Amino acid sequence: MRRKERTISIAFVIAGAILGSVLGEVLGAYYPFMRAGLHFGVPDFTLQLGFMELRLGFTLNMNIGTVGLALLFLFFSTLV
């Protein structure tokens, strides 16, 4: 994949993830399975220094839309 194509693909994946999350939250009120998912993460780690505070943490939320998006990306990447 060329650099421009890769940038466009990443932009579409990010836009799809954002739109899919919003759509999942809206439809989750009517269809509860849209909100079901898995949550993986590392709890926040706080480092307090005298002049600043640094917090680090990581959370990954996977739902049916995320899995579908990943499969769609893999499918289209094999076509190109």
Image (cartoon, helix red, strand yellow):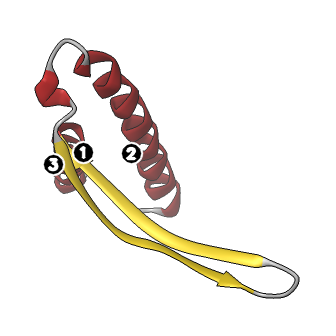
Residue at 33 percent across and 25 percent down: it is 25
Q: Which residue is mark 1?
A: 66
| Residue 28 screen position, x and y as percent | 24, 22
| Residue 29 screen position, x and y as percent | 25, 16
Residue at 38 percent across and 40 percent down: it is 17
> Which one is in front, 54 or 80?
54
**Mark 1–mark 2 CB contact (< 8 Å):** no
Left or right relative to 4: residue 38 = left
Instruction: Specify the amino acid type for callout 2.
Output: Val
The secondary element bearing badge 1 is classed as helix
| Residue 16 screen position, x and y as percent | 38, 36
- Circle nearer the N terminus (3, 2): 2
Looking at the image, can residue 60 be seen?
A: yes
> Which one is in front, 79 or 54?
54
Q: Which residue is mark 3?
A: 71
Looking at the image, can residue 76 be seen?
A: no
Residue at 17 percent across and 55 percent down: it is 78
Q: CA distance from mark 1 to mark 2?
A: 10 Å
Left or right relative to 17: residue 49 = right
Instruction: Specify the amino acid type for callout 1.
Output: Thr
Q: Which residue is mark 2?
A: 13
Q: CA distance from mark 3 to mark 1?
A: 9 Å
Residue at 43 percent across and 68 percent down: it is 58
The secondary element bearing badge 3 is classed as helix
15 to 75, vertically: above or below: above
Few, some or many C-alpha atoms within 10 Å of disc 2 (few <14, some 14-19, many ≥20)? some
